[in-house]
Amino acid sequence: MKPINAFLLKNNLRIAQNPCVSPDFCLDWAALQKAFFDASATGLKFYEKSRFETAAGTWTLVEHTVTGDTAWRLESTTLADPSKVLAEGVLTKPNRAVFPASWENLLRLKNLIQEKDAASTIFPTGTAKLGKSTLGVGARFTTLHWPAVEWAMSALEIGLTANQNSIPRELVYDVDAMLGNRLDTVPFPFIGTNVPEGHQGQSVEGMSHGCVLSKLKTGFHHRKIAWSFNADHQPIGGKFDVREDALVKGCLLASYITFDLSPELALNQKADVAAIPAEVVAQTRARVAAAGVTLDDAAFTALLATVWTPMQKMKRRDEKYAAARAAAFTTEVGRTYLRELSIDELPGLTTPETTAIMLALCEVLGMPVNFVAPAFGFQKNSPYPDNAALKKLIEAQWNVCAKFGVSIGFHSGSGKSAENYQVMGEVTGSALEIKTSGRYTYEMGVALSQSQNAADAALWKDWYQFTLDMAVAGAFSADPTEQKMARIFVNTSLEACGKSVDVYASPAATRAALETLPASAEHMVFFEYNFLYVLAAGGKPEKSALGDHTPAGYQQRARFYAVSPEARLLFSKRIAAYLIFLAENTGLASKERCAATSKLLEGYATLDAMLSDISR
């Protein structure tokens, strides 16, 4: 048994209450297979909508609903022994076998599926319009949003980047490193501390596995709508050099890689331009000029010296991604992936000249990108205040991107105004991606606050109080950045409700002022701190409790997977409504289609009714 599975079983952290921690979706195969031979066994659920074909026969997903352990059932009319198709197979009838839903079996199934049908949409791909126009749907806390995303894609008939997270910042890149307490930490200046990597709790392989199973359970794959999985903010260079092989291995199923050069660029190590191959310099200069960007020799040389080493490391990582896919997958569609160049986390606004030279180098080095993410000065969940200024900023970048055939990735894209999104869509002709991971934790807060279920109300009360505790502690922190940011969050929350912001005589005064506000997910104090609650041991606001990968952290995470059907429906409808709003205002779907989809969404009284429409 894998160490991670033994850890989860020992601590009774089962998939049904804590999915996607292990790369496997079966922790105890010995126990699960017995249920297939016990006529009195209960709890097995056969997902009839999950059925699909390979050359070996017909496959169905089976789940034990109590534990969450999952199996593949194969029925074959051609094979003498179907139990040999995947690892650890067991015959239940001469023509029927079952297999554990292990990570290794998932990778083998991908080949079997895509060898049978290259147009299959069970697994993420980079096909259709996904490399040009998409919405990036991540989440910084759970996977509970997936069915709603599948519904939105089905109803709107558009493919999205339906799975997206920053790795290793949000996801555990290596479960063995987690068990060995070897995870690094990520600085969060606004709370004045570092939080362990993978603060969402789940592993990248587990998320990769779970998002495929989710689409099979709802029958989404029958719609033949392509979707993608973005391994976001893949860190290039710096301290990540020694870990890049593990990052590549974990992101094997990602069909879309975001290369984040900021770790290497932060080192500010200038390259010797004279040592760069002359043909590379000449080709890059010519491509920048062809894009209509004028750079004098000094500016060109300075930019090239700044970015050359990071670009070399991006090339090395890109080659490793390609090699890993070539070794694991047998089809062209299974090996192909999209690329995004992220330069949005560097200080200041990105200049068109920087964008041009970076895109030119990507082309010259043989790794052309589909998206580039410049810095526009966006703040999460805050509208851009000046649409005319925003239009000019985007136009300056689009004039370059269009010459390279590259779409713009808008990071920190949550919570912008309809007018902001309209500007983005109009300037780019909808050749864009909006990344929105911060939004969906907020939407769960709204859903819980509206639920009439007692357990939901208790979770909401505890969650909201946690964010107030974090805000008050931060407002009196000795760390100047933490104090400044906390007071901005507090002031913004109070001002939005017409309250005075002269509240810093003491922590008690600040708390009293915040407690005069009705508990609401709309307050900035909730939005900024909410994601830290998911893996906070015991739900405590102490910094030492954050990002806790021990049983205490995962027991906290399980509270969200125990929310009521009422809360899940409220949450799912809000997720879908937000995606409809984005699709309409960015031009990814017509106003008529969005209006009809909104009307359909309003009519659902149960989550089952909503999800049953996904496969139609």
Image: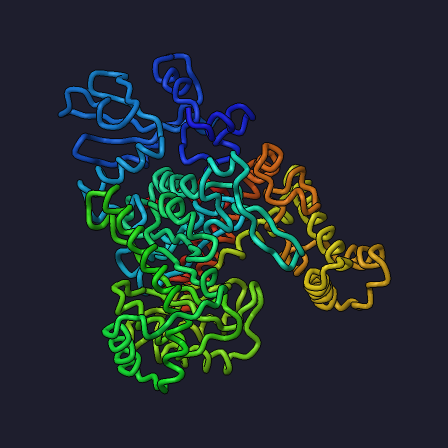
Q: How far from the left and from the top, in percent, is residue 445?
A: 61, 50
Q: Would residue 569 be visible to someone looking at this image?
A: no
Residue at screen point 36% across, 47% down: 248
| Residue 277, above or below 520 | below
Q: How far from the left and from the top, in percent, is residue 322?
A: 27, 51
| Residue 90, above or below 394 | above
Residue at screen point 39% across, 70% down: 271
Q: How far from the left and from the top, in percent, is residue 172?
A: 48, 43
| Residue 168, above or below 579 | above
Q: Would residue 366 be visible to someone looking at this image?
A: yes
Residue at screen point 47% across, 64% down: 411
Q: Is 225 in front, or is 290?
A: 290
| Residue 341, above or below 459 | below
Q: How far from the left and from the top, in percent, is residue 325?
A: 27, 47
Q: Is 240 in front, or is 509?
A: 240
The N terminus appears in which quarter of the rendering?
top left
